[in-house]
Amino acid sequence: MPPSGQGQHVLLTGANGFIASHILSTLLDAQREYAVTATVRSQAKAEDVIKAHPEWKGKIQFVIVSDFTSQEPFNTLFKDTNTPFKYIIHTASPLKLNIEDIQKEMIEPAVRGTTQILESAHKHGGTELERFVLLGSAVSVLDSFEDLGCEGRPYTEKDWNPVSAQQAIDRKDTVLGYNDFMQTNKPNFDLTVINPDIITGPMIHPISGTGSINETNHFAIASFIDGTNPKVEDVRFPFYHFVDVRDVARSHIGALTSPAAGGQRILLISGLITPQLVVDAIRKHFPSLRKKVPVGEPDKELPQGVHPTGWDMRVSLDVLSKGQGSPWKYISLEESVRDAVQSMINHNVLPV
Ligand SMILES: NC(=O)c1ccc[n+]([C@@H]2O[C@H](COP(=O)([O-])OP(=O)(O)OC[C@H]3O[C@@H](n4cnc5c(N)ncnc54)[C@H](OP(=O)(O)O)[C@@H]3O)[C@@H](O)[C@H]2O)c1
């Protein structure tokens, strides 16, 4: 069955995720006229997406891909589609901070999932496939061995995290990597990798209880409301820069068609996020939550001894601006935290 949209055909993976839901919403915006095929891991998850957004009914062609570590389901998907894909946006990847087996639960599905779909697209995507947009991570750029106690040279689009997958496992650290597929295979399509830092903002993915708050909105925001972090001073984040999920979605749509985005690694970072800045924003916008949210030390923006390295994003800002046809402006932390908490309240996922 072809997707119901009339426009250029886009394949989106992991459509029920926190970020992918925003990408899907932006794609389905009537103005944009994209036809969307979306993968999820089960029929129930496809139904959850439509339950959360009845207005999307009939507008998305769902395909069930339960195993991302095998190429077969992707081969079938490319062979069976009536209308060839012009673009692929790949977002499906595990995002859990507390995991036991990093190799099995994180690195294998993330790296293998990406290489399997890339290889399959290369073999069966056909000549109409123009661009593959990969939702990457700033963790592939920054140095996980960085000394947070002293600010280093700002990172640029040319930097790569020096931590190998094996070191990540040994250190019980989570780092994603992808190989030099494009150089080796030289496929018909080009690749754009978007590398956001911590992503926060409103949730529009299927929600069923407190466990549905996505990982980053939970550790960076909800943990100060639900009693997980009763003291701001004790909290250390793994990273200290953020971007709002709506900016992430916007960047992916711009990257689909912009000639400037081809072959680029785009850095996507709005600004600083710290435990203190987050509680300040919650307390400012939600007086009714003040009794639950710690005050911290409002005059201390950064935790004691933390001096995160900044980002030199001039190249990325130019690419992002060209992608949307106007100067790129980021959503602020205050707005992102405000809208994230409001969505938690609306979904009734905060303790009363
Ligand atoms: N959130 C952030 O701060 C952030 C920052 C930088 C990069 N990213 C990248 O963005 C990706 C998505 O993040 P998110 O916040 O949207 O996470 P999310 O809400 O947990 O969504 C993850 C999506 O990936 C799918 N998935 C998880 N494990 C999988 C596996 N083993 N095989 C196939 N699909 C799998 C999930 O499907 P199920 O629902 O079936 O599990 C879901 O559709 C992350 O994995 C990461 O690579 C995220």
Image (tube, rainbow, N blue to C red):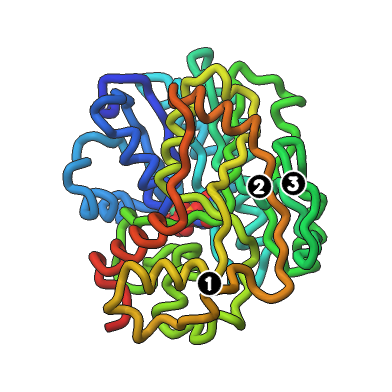
The mark that comes first in sequence, 2 or 1, is 2
CB of mark 3 near ligand 1 (< 8 Å): no
- Measured from the top left, where is residue 230 in percent x and y? 49, 86
Q: Residue at x 29, y 76 (%)?
A: 287
- Which residue has dot 1 on it? 276
The answer to whether residue 93 shows anywhere in this view is no
- Measured from the top left, where is residue 313 in percent x and y? 64, 38
Per the model, the C-alpha gap separating discs 2 and 1 is 34 Å
In front of the other: 45 or 138: 138
Q: Is residue 22 left or right of residue 328?
A: left
Measured along the vertical axis of the image, is residue 137 above or below residue 202?
A: above
Per the model, the C-alpha gap separating discs 2 and 3 is 27 Å
Per the model, the C-alpha gap separating discs 1 and 3 is 23 Å
CB of mark 2 near ligand 1 (< 8 Å): no
The amino acid pointed to by label 3 is Pro
Mark 2 and mark 3 in contact? Answer it, CB < 8 Å. no
In front of the other: 276 or 5: 276
The amino acid pointed to by label 2 is Val
- Which residue has dot 2 on it? 111
- Measured from the top left, where is residue 29 in percent x and y? 27, 32
The quadrant holding residue 350 is bottom left
Furthest residue in direction top, as rendered = 127
Q: Residues within 10 Å of mark 3 (few under 14, many from 20)?
A: few
The mark that comes first in sequence, 2 or 3, is 2
SS for dot 2 = helix
Between circles 2 and 1, the one closer to the viewer is: 1
